[in-house]
Protein backbone atom coordinates (compact mmCIF):
# COMPACT_ATOMS: atom_id res chain seq x y z
CA UNK A 1 0.00 0.00 0.00
CA UNK A 2 2.28 2.73 -1.24
CA UNK A 3 -0.19 5.41 -2.36
CA UNK A 4 1.58 6.00 -5.65
CA UNK A 5 -1.80 6.97 -7.13
CA UNK A 6 -4.07 9.43 -5.33
CA UNK A 7 -7.82 9.38 -5.49
CA UNK A 8 -7.71 12.51 -7.70
CA UNK A 9 -5.35 10.81 -10.12
CA UNK A 10 -7.59 7.77 -10.25
CA UNK A 11 -10.52 10.09 -10.96
CA UNK A 12 -8.55 11.77 -13.75
CA UNK A 13 -7.70 8.45 -15.39
CA UNK A 14 -11.33 7.37 -15.04
CA UNK A 15 -12.47 10.59 -16.72
CA UNK A 16 -10.08 10.03 -19.63
CA UNK A 17 -11.60 6.57 -20.08
CA UNK A 18 -15.12 8.02 -19.73
CA UNK A 19 -15.84 5.89 -16.63
CA UNK A 20 -17.78 7.03 -13.58
CA UNK A 21 -17.02 5.74 -10.08
CA UNK A 22 -18.12 6.49 -6.52
CA UNK A 23 -15.57 7.85 -4.05
CA UNK A 24 -15.31 4.42 -2.38
CA UNK A 25 -14.65 2.77 -5.71
CA UNK A 26 -12.03 5.41 -6.53
CA UNK A 27 -10.22 4.68 -3.25
CA UNK A 28 -10.23 0.99 -4.02
CA UNK A 29 -9.01 1.55 -7.60
CA UNK A 30 -6.30 3.96 -6.46
CA UNK A 31 -4.99 1.24 -4.15
CA UNK A 32 -5.08 -1.36 -6.93
CA UNK A 33 -3.36 0.94 -9.44
CA UNK A 34 -0.73 1.76 -6.82
CA UNK A 35 -0.06 -1.94 -6.37
CA UNK A 36 0.47 -2.26 -10.13
CA UNK A 37 2.99 0.57 -10.04
CA UNK A 38 4.69 -1.01 -7.02
CA UNK A 39 5.18 -4.12 -9.08
CA UNK A 40 6.62 -2.06 -11.95
CA UNK A 41 8.97 -0.41 -9.46
CA UNK A 42 10.12 -3.85 -8.26
CA UNK A 43 10.90 -4.85 -11.85
CA UNK A 44 12.64 -1.52 -12.43
CA UNK A 45 14.91 -2.18 -9.46
CA UNK A 46 16.34 -5.33 -11.10
CA UNK A 47 19.82 -5.18 -12.57
CA UNK A 48 19.20 -5.60 -16.31
CA UNK A 49 22.60 -4.50 -17.56
CA UNK A 50 23.63 -6.68 -20.46
CA UNK A 51 20.06 -7.69 -21.28
CA UNK A 52 18.66 -6.63 -24.68
CA UNK A 53 15.53 -4.47 -24.36
CA UNK A 54 12.43 -6.44 -25.41
CA UNK A 55 9.79 -4.40 -27.17
CA UNK A 56 7.62 -7.38 -28.03
CA UNK A 57 7.25 -10.96 -26.79
CA UNK A 58 7.88 -12.23 -30.33
CA UNK A 59 11.42 -11.62 -31.62
CA UNK A 60 10.01 -10.26 -34.87
CA UNK A 61 10.36 -7.06 -36.88
CA UNK A 62 8.96 -5.79 -40.19
CA UNK A 63 5.90 -7.99 -40.46
CA UNK A 64 4.31 -6.41 -43.50
CA UNK A 65 1.93 -7.21 -46.34
CA UNK A 66 2.00 -6.40 -50.05
CA UNK A 67 0.07 -3.28 -51.14
CA UNK A 68 -2.75 -5.13 -52.92
CA UNK A 69 -6.44 -4.34 -52.62
CA UNK A 70 -8.57 -6.98 -50.92
CA UNK A 71 -12.36 -7.04 -50.93
CA UNK A 72 -14.00 -4.77 -48.37
CA UNK A 73 -17.22 -5.60 -46.53
CA UNK A 74 -20.66 -5.01 -48.04
CA UNK A 75 -21.92 -1.66 -46.86
CA UNK A 76 -25.38 -2.99 -45.98
CA UNK A 77 -23.78 -5.62 -43.79
CA UNK A 78 -21.60 -3.01 -42.07
CA UNK A 79 -24.41 -0.54 -41.47
CA UNK A 80 -26.75 -3.26 -40.22
CA UNK A 81 -24.62 -3.22 -37.04
CA UNK A 82 -25.17 0.50 -36.46
CA UNK A 83 -27.83 1.83 -34.06
CA UNK A 84 -28.64 4.63 -36.49
CA UNK A 85 -27.90 5.16 -40.17
CA UNK A 86 -28.41 7.98 -42.68
CA UNK A 87 -27.16 8.55 -46.22
CA UNK A 88 -25.00 5.45 -46.18
CA UNK A 89 -23.21 6.65 -43.05
CA UNK A 90 -23.14 6.01 -39.34
CA UNK A 91 -25.43 8.52 -37.69
CA UNK A 92 -24.16 9.60 -34.29
CA UNK A 93 -25.36 12.11 -31.66
CA UNK A 94 -24.20 15.70 -32.05
CA UNK A 95 -20.54 15.86 -31.12
CA UNK A 96 -19.52 18.63 -28.79
CA UNK A 97 -16.26 20.19 -29.81
CA UNK A 98 -13.84 19.42 -32.55
CA UNK A 99 -11.84 16.29 -33.17
CA UNK A 100 -8.76 15.94 -30.95
CA UNK B 1 -12.17 36.96 -27.23
CA UNK B 2 -11.52 36.42 -30.90
CA UNK B 3 -9.26 39.40 -31.57
CA UNK B 4 -9.64 42.29 -33.96
CA UNK B 5 -10.31 41.61 -37.62
CA UNK B 6 -7.56 40.66 -39.97
CA UNK B 7 -4.68 43.03 -40.62
CA UNK B 8 -2.10 42.70 -43.30
CA UNK B 9 1.51 43.66 -43.21
CA UNK B 10 4.52 43.24 -41.03
CA UNK B 11 4.59 43.05 -37.26
CA UNK B 12 5.05 46.05 -35.04
CA UNK B 13 8.66 47.12 -34.64
CA UNK B 14 10.71 44.95 -32.34
CA UNK B 15 8.63 41.75 -32.75
CA UNK B 16 9.48 38.60 -34.60
CA UNK B 17 7.25 35.76 -35.76
CA UNK B 18 8.07 32.17 -34.77
CA UNK B 19 6.22 29.47 -36.69
CA UNK B 20 6.46 25.68 -36.83
CA UNK B 21 4.28 23.68 -39.19
CA UNK B 22 2.76 20.22 -38.87
CA UNK B 23 1.85 18.90 -42.29
CA UNK B 24 -0.25 15.75 -42.70
CA UNK B 25 0.17 14.06 -46.05
CA UNK B 26 -1.90 11.13 -47.30
CA UNK B 27 0.28 8.56 -49.04
CA UNK B 28 -0.92 7.43 -52.47
CA UNK B 29 -0.70 3.70 -51.79
CA UNK B 30 -3.28 1.35 -53.31
CA UNK B 31 -4.50 0.20 -49.89
CA UNK B 32 -4.82 1.47 -46.34
CA UNK B 33 -2.03 1.36 -43.75
CA UNK B 34 -3.14 -1.73 -41.84
CA UNK B 35 -5.66 -3.51 -44.10
CA UNK B 36 -6.31 -4.27 -47.77
CA UNK B 37 -9.21 -1.82 -48.20
CA UNK B 38 -8.77 0.54 -51.15
CA UNK B 39 -7.22 3.93 -50.38
CA UNK B 40 -9.36 6.01 -52.71
CA UNK B 41 -10.79 9.53 -52.40
CA UNK B 42 -14.36 10.24 -53.45
CA UNK B 43 -15.92 6.74 -53.26
CA UNK B 44 -19.41 6.15 -51.86
CA UNK B 45 -19.29 6.44 -48.03
CA UNK B 46 -18.37 3.31 -46.06
CA UNK B 47 -17.66 1.15 -49.10
CA UNK B 48 -13.91 0.76 -48.37
CA UNK B 49 -14.16 -0.63 -44.85
CA UNK B 50 -13.39 -3.97 -43.21
CA UNK B 51 -13.11 -5.43 -39.70
CA UNK B 52 -9.60 -3.94 -39.24
CA UNK B 53 -10.38 -0.31 -40.10
CA UNK B 54 -13.75 -0.53 -38.34
CA UNK B 55 -11.97 -1.74 -35.20
CA UNK B 56 -14.12 -4.85 -34.87
CA UNK B 57 -13.12 -7.26 -32.07
CA UNK B 58 -10.62 -9.93 -33.05
CA UNK B 59 -9.24 -8.11 -36.09
CA UNK B 60 -5.50 -7.55 -36.37
CA UNK B 61 -3.59 -4.85 -38.28
CA UNK B 62 -0.76 -5.77 -40.68
CA UNK B 63 1.53 -3.00 -41.95
CA UNK B 64 1.43 -2.05 -45.64
CA UNK B 65 5.03 -2.41 -46.92
CA UNK B 66 4.50 0.27 -49.58
CA UNK B 67 3.40 2.83 -46.98
CA UNK B 68 6.60 2.25 -44.99
CA UNK B 69 8.65 2.52 -48.18
CA UNK B 70 6.92 5.80 -49.16
CA UNK B 71 7.46 7.22 -45.67
CA UNK B 72 11.17 6.35 -45.70
CA UNK B 73 11.50 7.79 -49.21
CA UNK B 74 10.03 11.07 -47.94
CA UNK B 75 12.31 10.97 -44.92
CA UNK B 76 15.41 10.58 -47.06
CA UNK B 77 14.24 13.31 -49.48
CA UNK B 78 14.09 15.58 -46.41
CA UNK B 79 17.55 14.50 -45.30
CA UNK B 80 16.20 12.67 -42.25
CA UNK B 81 17.79 9.83 -40.42
CA UNK B 82 15.67 6.69 -40.96
CA UNK B 83 15.52 4.76 -37.70
CA UNK B 84 13.99 1.66 -36.16
CA UNK B 85 10.43 2.58 -35.25
CA UNK B 86 7.57 1.42 -33.08
CA UNK B 87 3.82 1.92 -33.51
CA UNK B 88 1.88 3.36 -30.58
CA UNK B 89 -1.76 3.84 -29.71
CA UNK B 90 -3.01 7.39 -29.24
CA UNK B 91 -6.13 6.98 -27.13
CA UNK B 92 -9.12 9.31 -27.37
CA UNK B 93 -12.87 9.14 -27.67
CA UNK B 94 -14.31 10.62 -30.81
CA UNK B 95 -16.41 8.87 -33.43
CA UNK B 96 -13.90 9.54 -36.23
CA UNK B 97 -11.90 6.52 -34.97
CA UNK B 98 -14.03 3.45 -34.26
CA UNK B 99 -11.23 1.73 -32.28
CA UNK B 100 -11.13 4.70 -29.83
CA UNK B 101 -7.45 5.01 -30.62
CA UNK B 102 -5.38 6.03 -33.59
CA UNK B 103 -2.27 4.04 -34.47
CA UNK B 104 0.67 6.43 -34.77
CA UNK B 105 4.35 6.58 -33.93
CA UNK B 106 5.29 8.36 -30.73
CA UNK B 107 8.72 8.22 -29.08
CA UNK B 108 10.32 6.14 -31.86
CA UNK B 109 9.28 7.64 -35.22
CA UNK B 110 10.58 6.39 -38.57
CA UNK B 111 12.25 9.68 -39.62
CA UNK B 112 14.04 12.27 -37.47
CA UNK B 113 16.32 15.29 -37.84
CA UNK B 114 16.07 16.47 -41.42
CA UNK B 115 15.76 19.80 -43.14
CA UNK B 116 14.10 21.47 -46.07
CA UNK B 117 15.87 24.13 -48.12
CA UNK B 118 13.65 26.88 -49.51
CA UNK B 119 14.23 28.36 -52.99
CA UNK B 120 15.87 31.47 -51.47
CA UNK B 121 18.41 29.32 -49.60
CA UNK B 122 16.82 29.54 -46.13
CA UNK B 123 16.74 26.20 -44.33
CA UNK B 124 13.88 24.95 -42.13
CA UNK B 125 14.67 22.09 -39.74
CA UNK B 126 12.51 18.97 -39.75
CA UNK B 127 12.09 17.48 -36.29
CA UNK B 128 10.40 14.27 -37.37
CA UNK B 129 8.25 12.67 -40.05
CA UNK B 130 6.25 9.81 -38.60
CA UNK B 131 3.75 7.30 -39.96
CA UNK B 132 0.16 7.19 -38.71
CA UNK B 133 -3.32 6.28 -39.88
CA UNK B 134 -5.88 8.85 -40.98
CA UNK B 135 -9.23 9.18 -39.21
CA UNK B 136 -12.73 8.84 -40.62
CA UNK B 137 -14.64 11.82 -41.93
CA UNK B 138 -17.41 13.31 -39.79
CA UNK B 139 -20.01 15.64 -41.27
CA UNK B 140 -22.04 17.77 -38.90
CA UNK B 141 -25.66 18.07 -39.96
CA UNK B 142 -28.07 20.85 -38.99
CA UNK B 143 -27.32 24.03 -37.03
CA UNK B 144 -26.07 25.83 -40.12
CA UNK B 145 -23.00 23.58 -40.29
CA UNK B 146 -21.63 24.83 -36.96
CA UNK B 147 -20.24 22.03 -34.86
CA UNK B 148 -21.79 23.18 -31.58
CA UNK B 149 -25.30 23.64 -33.00
CA UNK B 150 -25.36 20.44 -35.04
CA UNK B 151 -28.38 18.16 -34.82
CA UNK B 152 -26.35 15.02 -35.46
CA UNK B 153 -23.20 13.88 -37.23
CA UNK B 154 -22.60 11.41 -40.04
CA UNK B 155 -19.46 9.29 -40.14
CA UNK B 156 -17.76 7.80 -43.20
CA UNK B 157 -14.88 5.41 -42.45
CA UNK B 158 -13.46 5.20 -45.99
CA UNK B 159 -10.62 7.49 -44.86
CA UNK B 160 -10.08 5.71 -41.53
CA UNK B 161 -6.78 3.86 -41.78
CA UNK B 162 -5.45 5.64 -44.87
CA UNK B 163 -1.67 6.00 -44.45
CA UNK B 164 -0.38 9.43 -43.45
CA UNK B 165 3.01 10.92 -42.79
CA UNK B 166 3.04 13.85 -40.39
CA UNK B 167 5.98 16.15 -41.07
CA UNK B 168 6.81 18.29 -38.06
CA UNK B 169 9.07 21.27 -38.70
CA UNK B 170 11.18 23.01 -36.12
CA UNK B 171 10.01 26.54 -35.20
CA UNK B 172 12.35 28.00 -37.83
CA UNK B 173 9.80 29.82 -39.99
CA UNK B 174 9.83 33.61 -39.60
CA UNK B 175 6.96 34.87 -41.73
CA UNK B 176 3.56 34.06 -43.21
CA UNK B 177 4.95 34.11 -46.74
CA UNK B 178 7.83 31.85 -45.73
CA UNK B 179 5.32 29.38 -44.30
CA UNK B 180 3.57 29.29 -47.66
CA UNK B 181 6.88 28.82 -49.44
CA UNK B 182 7.73 25.92 -47.11
CA UNK B 183 4.46 24.16 -47.90
CA UNK B 184 4.88 24.77 -51.64
CA UNK B 185 8.40 23.33 -51.53
CA UNK B 186 7.31 20.33 -49.47
CA UNK B 187 4.53 19.72 -51.99
CA UNK B 188 7.02 19.91 -54.87
CA UNK B 189 9.18 17.27 -53.15
CA UNK B 190 6.17 15.01 -52.49
CA UNK B 191 5.17 15.19 -56.15
CA UNK B 192 8.75 14.65 -57.34
CA UNK B 193 9.20 11.46 -55.30
CA UNK B 194 5.66 10.28 -56.12
CA UNK B 195 4.43 9.43 -52.62
CA UNK B 196 1.34 11.67 -52.51
CA UNK B 197 -0.82 13.77 -54.79
CA UNK B 198 -0.62 16.44 -52.04
CA UNK B 199 -3.90 18.19 -52.88
CA UNK B 200 -4.86 20.66 -50.16
CA UNK B 201 -8.32 21.16 -51.67
CA UNK B 202 -9.06 17.42 -51.41
CA UNK B 203 -7.54 17.16 -47.95
CA UNK B 204 -4.67 14.88 -48.96
CA UNK B 205 -2.32 17.56 -47.58
CA UNK B 206 -3.39 19.34 -44.38
CA UNK B 207 -1.50 21.97 -42.45
CA UNK B 208 -1.58 23.03 -38.78
CA UNK B 209 0.50 26.05 -37.74
CA UNK B 210 2.10 26.64 -34.33
CA UNK B 211 2.43 30.39 -33.97
CA UNK B 212 4.12 32.57 -31.37
CA UNK B 213 5.98 35.89 -31.31
CA UNK B 214 9.03 37.16 -29.45
CA UNK B 215 11.11 40.32 -29.24
CA UNK B 216 13.64 40.55 -32.07
CA UNK B 217 17.03 39.31 -30.93
CA UNK B 218 15.65 36.96 -28.31
CA UNK B 219 15.92 33.18 -28.60
CA UNK B 220 13.06 32.35 -26.26
CA UNK B 221 10.00 30.41 -27.33
CA UNK B 222 6.89 32.08 -25.95
CA UNK B 223 3.39 30.64 -25.56
CA UNK B 224 2.19 29.27 -28.86
CA UNK B 225 -1.21 28.64 -30.33
CA UNK B 226 -1.91 25.84 -32.75
CA UNK B 227 -4.11 26.89 -35.66
CA UNK B 228 -6.09 24.12 -37.33
CA UNK B 229 -8.43 24.00 -40.29
CA UNK B 230 -6.09 25.60 -42.82
CA UNK B 231 -7.30 24.26 -46.14
CA UNK B 232 -5.39 26.47 -48.58
CA UNK B 233 -2.09 28.29 -48.86
CA UNK B 234 -4.01 31.54 -48.75
CA UNK B 235 -5.69 30.61 -45.46
CA UNK B 236 -2.33 29.55 -44.05
CA UNK B 237 -0.75 32.94 -44.77
CA UNK B 238 -3.76 34.94 -43.55
CA UNK B 239 -4.16 32.89 -40.36
CA UNK B 240 -0.51 33.21 -39.37
CA UNK B 241 -0.53 36.98 -39.99
CA UNK B 242 -3.71 37.40 -37.97
CA UNK B 243 -2.48 35.28 -35.09
CA UNK B 244 0.89 37.05 -34.94
CA UNK B 245 -0.76 40.48 -34.64
CA UNK B 246 -3.08 39.12 -31.95
CA UNK B 247 -0.11 37.88 -29.90
CA UNK B 248 1.79 41.16 -30.26
CA UNK B 249 -1.31 43.07 -29.11
CA UNK B 250 -1.68 40.83 -26.06
CA UNK B 251 1.99 41.02 -25.01
CA UNK B 252 2.09 44.77 -25.68
CA UNK B 253 -0.99 45.25 -23.50
CA UNK B 254 0.64 43.40 -20.60
CA UNK B 255 -1.35 40.22 -21.19
CA UNK B 256 -0.22 36.84 -22.46
CA UNK B 257 -1.82 34.48 -24.96
CA UNK B 258 -3.26 31.24 -23.58
CA UNK B 259 -1.77 28.06 -24.95
CA UNK B 260 -4.66 26.63 -26.94
CA UNK B 261 -5.86 25.21 -30.21
CA UNK B 262 -7.50 27.82 -32.44
CA UNK B 263 -9.56 27.56 -35.57
CA UNK B 264 -9.23 29.67 -38.69
CA UNK B 265 -12.50 31.29 -39.69
CA UNK B 266 -12.05 31.91 -43.41
CA UNK B 267 -15.11 34.12 -43.82
CA UNK B 268 -14.44 36.22 -40.70
CA UNK B 269 -10.70 36.48 -41.39
CA UNK B 270 -9.84 35.60 -37.78
CA UNK B 271 -8.88 32.72 -35.51
CA UNK B 272 -11.28 31.58 -32.79
CA UNK B 273 -10.43 29.60 -29.65
CA UNK B 274 -10.88 25.83 -29.54
CA UNK B 275 -9.81 23.51 -26.78
CA UNK B 276 -7.85 25.24 -24.06
CA UNK B 277 -5.15 23.95 -21.82
CA UNK B 278 -7.60 22.71 -19.19
CA UNK B 279 -8.57 19.98 -21.65
CA UNK B 280 -4.97 19.49 -22.71
CA UNK B 281 -4.46 16.23 -24.51
CA UNK B 282 -3.72 13.22 -22.43
CA UNK B 283 -3.58 10.56 -25.08
CA UNK B 284 -2.00 7.88 -22.87
CA UNK B 285 0.26 6.69 -25.67
CA UNK B 286 1.53 3.16 -25.36
CA UNK B 287 3.13 0.71 -27.73
CA UNK B 288 0.59 -1.15 -29.88
CA UNK B 289 0.84 -4.81 -28.84
CA UNK B 290 -0.67 -5.93 -32.17
CA UNK B 291 2.27 -4.59 -34.19
CA UNK B 292 5.97 -5.43 -34.18
CA UNK B 293 8.73 -2.83 -34.65
CA UNK B 294 10.05 -1.66 -38.01
CA UNK B 295 13.78 -2.15 -38.38
CA UNK B 296 14.96 -0.86 -41.75
CA UNK B 297 18.37 -2.22 -42.72
CA UNK B 298 21.21 -0.08 -44.04
CA UNK B 299 20.77 -1.82 -47.41
CA UNK B 300 17.11 -0.83 -47.51
CA UNK B 301 17.96 2.80 -46.83
CA UNK B 302 20.76 2.74 -49.40
CA UNK B 303 18.35 1.35 -52.01
CA UNK B 304 15.90 4.16 -51.26
CA UNK B 305 18.66 6.76 -51.62
CA UNK B 306 19.76 5.29 -54.93
CA UNK B 307 16.23 5.39 -56.32
CA UNK B 308 15.44 9.00 -55.28
CA UNK B 309 14.87 11.26 -58.30
CA UNK B 310 16.62 14.62 -58.64
CA UNK B 311 14.79 16.87 -56.19
CA UNK B 312 13.25 20.26 -57.03
CA UNK B 313 16.04 22.30 -55.41
CA UNK B 314 18.68 20.58 -57.57
CA UNK B 315 16.48 20.92 -60.67
CA UNK B 316 16.07 24.65 -60.10
CA UNK B 317 19.83 25.00 -59.69
CA UNK B 318 20.44 23.06 -62.93
CA UNK B 319 17.99 25.27 -64.82
CA UNK B 320 19.51 28.47 -63.45
CA UNK B 321 22.96 27.21 -64.44
CA UNK B 322 21.75 26.36 -67.96
CA UNK B 323 20.24 29.85 -68.19
CA UNK B 324 23.57 31.48 -67.34
CA UNK B 325 21.89 34.39 -65.57
CA UNK B 326 19.13 34.88 -68.14
CA UNK B 327 16.51 32.75 -66.34
CA UNK B 328 14.83 34.36 -63.32
CA UNK B 329 14.52 32.47 -60.01
CA UNK B 330 10.74 32.76 -60.12
CA UNK B 331 10.58 31.33 -63.66
CA UNK B 332 12.88 28.49 -62.57
CA UNK B 333 10.63 27.68 -59.57
CA UNK B 334 7.51 27.73 -61.75
CA UNK B 335 9.03 25.61 -64.51
CA UNK B 336 10.19 22.95 -62.05
CA UNK B 337 6.78 22.98 -60.38
CA UNK B 338 5.16 22.40 -63.79
CA UNK B 339 7.73 19.74 -64.68
CA UNK B 340 8.81 21.79 -67.72
CA UNK B 341 12.41 22.37 -66.67
CA UNK B 342 13.82 19.47 -68.69
CA UNK B 343 12.01 20.74 -71.80
CA UNK B 344 13.53 24.19 -71.38
CA UNK B 345 17.01 22.89 -70.57
CA UNK B 346 17.04 20.60 -73.60
CA UNK B 347 15.85 23.40 -75.90
CA UNK B 348 18.54 25.68 -74.50
CA UNK B 349 21.15 22.96 -75.01
CA UNK B 350 20.04 22.91 -78.67
CA UNK B 351 20.91 26.58 -78.91
CA UNK B 352 17.65 28.35 -77.99
CA UNK B 353 18.00 31.70 -76.17
CA UNK B 354 17.70 30.79 -72.45
CA UNK B 355 15.87 33.91 -71.21
CA UNK B 356 13.38 33.95 -74.07
CA UNK B 357 12.75 30.18 -73.79
CA UNK B 358 12.08 30.38 -70.05
CA UNK B 359 9.78 33.39 -70.46
CA UNK B 360 7.84 31.93 -73.37
CA UNK B 361 7.29 28.58 -71.63
CA UNK B 362 6.45 30.01 -68.20
CA UNK B 363 4.04 32.61 -69.65
CA UNK B 364 2.49 30.73 -72.53
CA UNK B 365 2.68 27.02 -71.78
CA UNK B 366 0.47 26.93 -68.67
CA UNK B 367 -1.55 23.98 -69.95
CA UNK B 368 -2.12 20.50 -68.55
CA UNK B 369 -1.09 18.59 -71.66
CA UNK B 370 1.97 19.94 -73.42
CA UNK B 371 3.21 16.51 -74.48
CA UNK B 372 3.20 17.49 -78.17
CA UNK B 373 5.73 20.27 -77.60
CA UNK B 374 9.15 18.72 -78.19
CA UNK B 375 12.46 20.31 -77.20
CA UNK B 376 13.54 20.73 -80.85
CA UNK B 377 10.13 22.19 -81.77
CA UNK B 378 10.50 24.66 -78.90
CA UNK B 379 14.07 25.49 -79.88
CA UNK B 380 12.95 26.14 -83.47
CA UNK B 381 10.11 28.40 -82.29
CA UNK B 382 12.42 30.43 -80.06
CA UNK B 383 14.86 30.65 -82.98
CA UNK B 384 12.15 32.18 -85.19
CA UNK B 385 11.20 34.68 -82.50
CA UNK B 386 14.73 35.57 -81.43
CA UNK B 387 15.81 36.25 -85.01
CA UNK B 388 12.81 38.50 -85.56
CA UNK B 389 11.24 36.27 -88.21
CA UNK B 390 8.01 36.20 -86.23
CA UNK B 391 6.75 38.60 -83.55
CA UNK B 392 6.14 37.78 -79.89
CA UNK B 393 2.39 37.75 -80.50
CA UNK B 394 2.80 35.39 -83.40
CA UNK B 395 5.14 33.16 -81.38
CA UNK B 396 2.44 32.74 -78.73
CA UNK B 397 -0.09 31.74 -81.38
CA UNK B 398 2.32 29.27 -82.96
CA UNK B 399 3.06 27.74 -79.54
CA UNK B 400 -0.67 27.36 -78.86
CA UNK B 401 -1.02 25.48 -82.14
CA UNK B 402 2.02 23.32 -81.33
CA UNK B 403 0.23 22.29 -78.10
CA UNK B 404 -2.87 21.28 -80.08
CA UNK B 405 -1.41 19.78 -83.23
CA UNK B 406 2.25 19.16 -82.45
CA UNK B 407 3.30 20.46 -85.85
CA UNK B 408 6.69 22.12 -86.35
CA UNK B 409 6.70 25.88 -85.80
CA UNK B 410 8.03 26.85 -89.24
CA UNK B 411 5.15 25.09 -91.03
CA UNK B 412 2.59 26.58 -88.63
CA UNK B 413 3.99 30.08 -89.17
CA UNK B 414 3.99 29.63 -92.92
CA UNK B 415 0.46 28.22 -93.02
CA UNK B 416 -0.82 31.17 -91.02
CA UNK B 417 1.08 33.64 -93.19
CA UNK B 418 3.13 34.67 -90.19
CA UNK B 419 6.35 36.38 -90.84
CA UNK B 420 7.53 39.48 -89.20
CA UNK B 421 7.88 42.22 -91.79
CA UNK B 422 11.30 42.96 -93.08
CA UNK B 423 12.65 46.17 -91.57
CA UNK B 424 12.36 48.24 -94.79
CA UNK B 425 8.75 47.21 -95.39
CA UNK B 426 7.85 48.10 -91.81
CA UNK B 427 9.51 51.52 -92.03
CA UNK B 428 7.61 52.24 -95.27
CA UNK B 429 4.32 51.25 -93.65
CA UNK B 430 5.01 53.46 -90.63
CA UNK B 431 5.79 56.40 -92.99
CA UNK B 432 2.52 55.84 -94.82
CA UNK B 433 0.52 55.79 -91.57
CA UNK B 434 2.25 58.99 -90.38
CA UNK B 435 1.51 60.71 -93.68
CA UNK B 436 -2.14 59.69 -93.42
CA UNK B 437 -2.53 61.14 -89.92
CA UNK B 438 -0.69 64.50 -89.89
CA UNK B 439 -2.60 66.03 -86.94
CA UNK B 440 -1.90 63.04 -84.67
CA UNK B 441 1.73 63.02 -85.76
CA UNK B 442 2.05 66.73 -84.95
CA UNK B 443 0.68 66.10 -81.46
CA UNK B 444 2.89 63.05 -81.03
CA UNK B 445 6.01 65.09 -81.82
CA UNK B 446 5.16 68.11 -79.65
CA UNK B 447 3.21 66.45 -76.82
CA UNK B 448 4.33 65.42 -73.34
CA UNK B 449 4.98 61.84 -72.28
CA UNK B 450 1.33 61.05 -71.62
CA UNK B 451 0.28 62.26 -75.07
CA UNK B 452 3.10 60.37 -76.62
CA UNK B 453 2.17 57.12 -74.92
CA UNK B 454 -1.46 57.51 -75.92
CA UNK B 455 -0.64 58.38 -79.51
CA UNK B 456 1.98 55.70 -79.95
CA UNK B 457 -0.81 53.24 -79.11
CA UNK B 458 -2.88 54.86 -81.83
CA UNK B 459 -0.09 54.60 -84.41
CA UNK B 460 0.80 51.02 -83.51
CA UNK B 461 -2.89 50.12 -83.89
CA UNK B 462 -2.97 51.73 -87.34
CA UNK B 463 0.18 49.91 -88.44
CA UNK B 464 -1.16 46.61 -87.10
CA UNK B 465 -4.38 47.15 -89.02
CA UNK B 466 -2.68 47.85 -92.31
CA UNK B 467 -0.30 44.87 -91.86
CA UNK B 468 -3.01 42.56 -90.48
CA UNK B 469 -1.05 42.01 -87.31
CA UNK B 470 2.25 41.03 -88.87
CA UNK B 471 4.17 43.98 -87.47
CA UNK B 472 6.16 43.77 -84.25
CA UNK B 473 4.64 46.34 -81.89
CA UNK B 474 7.93 47.05 -80.14
CA UNK B 475 9.66 47.64 -83.48
CA UNK B 476 6.92 50.07 -84.57
CA UNK B 477 7.31 52.00 -81.34
CA UNK B 478 11.07 52.20 -81.84
CA UNK B 479 10.57 53.58 -85.36
CA UNK B 480 8.05 56.17 -84.12
CA UNK B 481 10.41 57.42 -81.42
CA UNK B 482 13.29 57.62 -83.93
CA UNK B 483 11.26 59.53 -86.48
CA UNK B 484 9.98 61.97 -83.86
CA UNK B 485 13.54 62.66 -82.85
CA UNK B 486 14.06 60.49 -79.78
Image (spheres, rainbow, N blue to C red):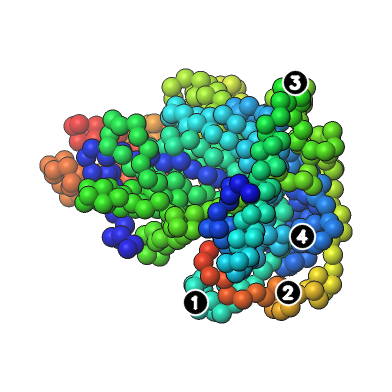
**Percent coordinates x, y for residue B399 in the rendering:** 56, 41
Looking at the image, is mark 1 or mark 3 nearer the viewer?
Answer: 3
Looking at the image, is mark 4 or mark 3 nearer the viewer?
Answer: 3
Which mark, residue A88? 2
Verify CB contact (< 8 Å) between mark 4 and mark 3.
Answer: no
Cα distance, mark 4 to mark 2?
Answer: 18 Å
Is label 4 on the same chain as label 2? Answer: no
The answer to which of marks 3 and 2 sits earlier in the sequence is: 3
Residue to which mark 1 is pinned: B149
Which mark, residue B55? 4
Work out which quarter of the rendered image holds the N terminus of chain B and state it. bottom left
Which residue is found at the position 45% from the left and 43% from the top? B180
Q: Nearer the viewer, residue B452 or B1?
A: B1
Which mark, residue A50? 3
Up/down of A90 relative to B478, above or below: below
Is label 4 on the same chain as label 3? Answer: no
- Which chain is disc 4 placed on? B
Amino acid sequence: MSGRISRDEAAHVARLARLRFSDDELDELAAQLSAVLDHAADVEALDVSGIEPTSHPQPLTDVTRVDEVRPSLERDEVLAQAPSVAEGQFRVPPILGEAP
Amino acid sequence: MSGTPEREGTLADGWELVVGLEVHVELSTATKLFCGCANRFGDEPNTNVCPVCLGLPGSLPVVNAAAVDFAMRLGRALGCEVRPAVFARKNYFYPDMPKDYQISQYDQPTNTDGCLELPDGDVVGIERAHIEEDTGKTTHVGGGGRIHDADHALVDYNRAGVPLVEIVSRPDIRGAEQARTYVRELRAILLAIGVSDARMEEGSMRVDANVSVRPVGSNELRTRCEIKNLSSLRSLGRAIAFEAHRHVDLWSGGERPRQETRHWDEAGGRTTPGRSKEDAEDYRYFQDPDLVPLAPSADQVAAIDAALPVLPAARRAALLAAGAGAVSASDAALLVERDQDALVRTAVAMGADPGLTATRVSNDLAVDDWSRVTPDGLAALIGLEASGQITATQAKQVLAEMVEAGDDPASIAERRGFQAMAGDDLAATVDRVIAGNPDEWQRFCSGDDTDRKKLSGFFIGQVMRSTRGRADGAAVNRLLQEKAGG
